[in-house]
Image: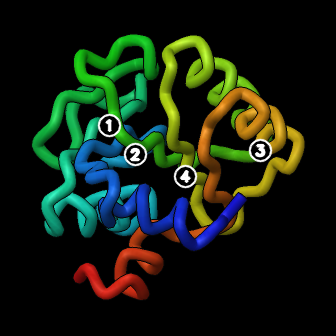
Amino acid sequence: MNEPEVIRIMLGHPPAEPRTIAVIGLSDNPDKPSNYVPAYMQQHGYRILPVNPMVESVLGERSYASLADLTVKPDVVNVFRLPKFIPEIVEQMLALGLKNLWVQQGIIHPEAATAAEAGGINVVMDRCIMVEHGIAGLS
């Protein structure tokens, strides 16, 4: 978990070029990190796929009720939900064959991270994707 190489790959450094991020819990409130962090990533060339059954669209993209409803397979699943929701998200990712899980800063569920990695999912947890993007010099 949180290996520098995994972070680089998820942000789009070679050898992989992730450019599509499904954001679970994306808010339509621009004052919340769950809106301005994905907006930042969108402004830097990433396609954002909102996953939030409570909103119709966010950041100019249609919102989906769940990962299973997405019409595009995302390169990265970025999570802005409470820790108690992480195990279910991992189960969905395993069922859908999704390989990269990024759980935002302040959200920690070690058991879910272990289960994800055991299932072949790369995990970054308790890190902000926007901050790491800046640290990587991609901004």
Q: CA distance from mark 3 to mark 1?
A: 22 Å
Q: Amino acid at mark 1?
A: Pro
Q: Nearer the viewer, residue 119 or 43?
A: 119
* Residue at the front extreme of this rendering: 15
Question: Can you give x and y, in whole percent of width and height, for residue 91 in the image?
Answer: 68, 20
Q: Amino acid at mark 2?
A: Leu
Label 1 or label 2, whichever comes before in sequence order: 2
Residue located beneath label 4 in the image: 102
Q: Is residue 58 above or below residue 71?
A: below
Label 4 or label 1, whichever comes before in sequence order: 1
Residue located beneath label 3 in the image: 113
Q: Looking at the image, is mark 2 or mark 3 nearer the viewer?
A: 3
Q: CA distance from mark 2 to mark 4?
A: 14 Å
Q: CA distance from mark 1 to mark 2?
A: 6 Å
Q: Residues within 10 Å of mark 3 (few under 14, many from 20)?
A: many
Question: Can you give x and y, in whole percent of width and height, for residue 110 in the image?
Answer: 86, 50
- 123 with respect to 25 (left or right): right
Residue located beneath label 1 in the image: 50
Per the rendering, the mark at residue 58 is: none
The quarter of the rendered structure image containing the N terminus is bottom right
